[in-house]
Image (cartoon, rainbow, N blue to C red):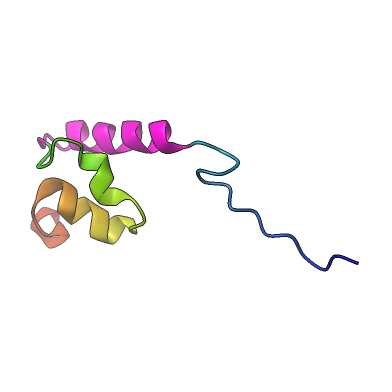
Amino acid sequence: MTDAIVFDMDGVLIDSGAHHRAAWQALLEEIGEEPTHPEPWRLTIGRPSEEAVPLLINRRLSDFV
């Protein structure tokens, strides 16, 4: 008898990479920032947004608050 099943959906069952890249690009455009890295989305992989955004814009989030 099976008690549980674990699905790792992101990148396994669903390829959401293109959507993540588009969302990060949209954020950068919305706030008028240029990427600080040639492939900025790579900086965000496996990171919560609180860590990813400062890496994308090369400054602390508190600079925007």
Residue at (9% x, 42% y) in the render: 36
Residue at (25% x, 54% y) in the render: 52
Question: On the picture, is 45 further left or further right than 13?
Answer: left
Who is closer to the viewer here, 54 or 62? Answer: 54
Residue at (31% x, 55% y) in the render: 49
Quarter of the image for residue 62 reads bottom left
Q: Residue furthest right?
A: 1
Question: Relative to 3, is 47 above or below?
Answer: above
| Residue 25 magenta | yes
On the image, the x and y values in percent for residue 53 come to 22, 51
Question: Relative to 41, is 4 above or below?
Answer: below
On the image, the x and y values in percent for residue 60 come to 11, 60
Q: Quadrant of the C terminus?
A: bottom left
Secondary structure, magenta segment, majority class = helix
Quarter of the image for residue 21 reads top left
Question: On the picture, is 48 further left or further right than 53?
Answer: right
Q: Which residues are magenta?
A: 16-34
Who is closer to the viewer here, 50 or 62? Answer: 50
Q: Quadrant of the N terminus?
A: bottom right
On the image, the x and y values in percent for residue 34 come to 9, 35
Question: Relative to 1, is 21 above or below?
Answer: above
Q: How many marks?
A: 0
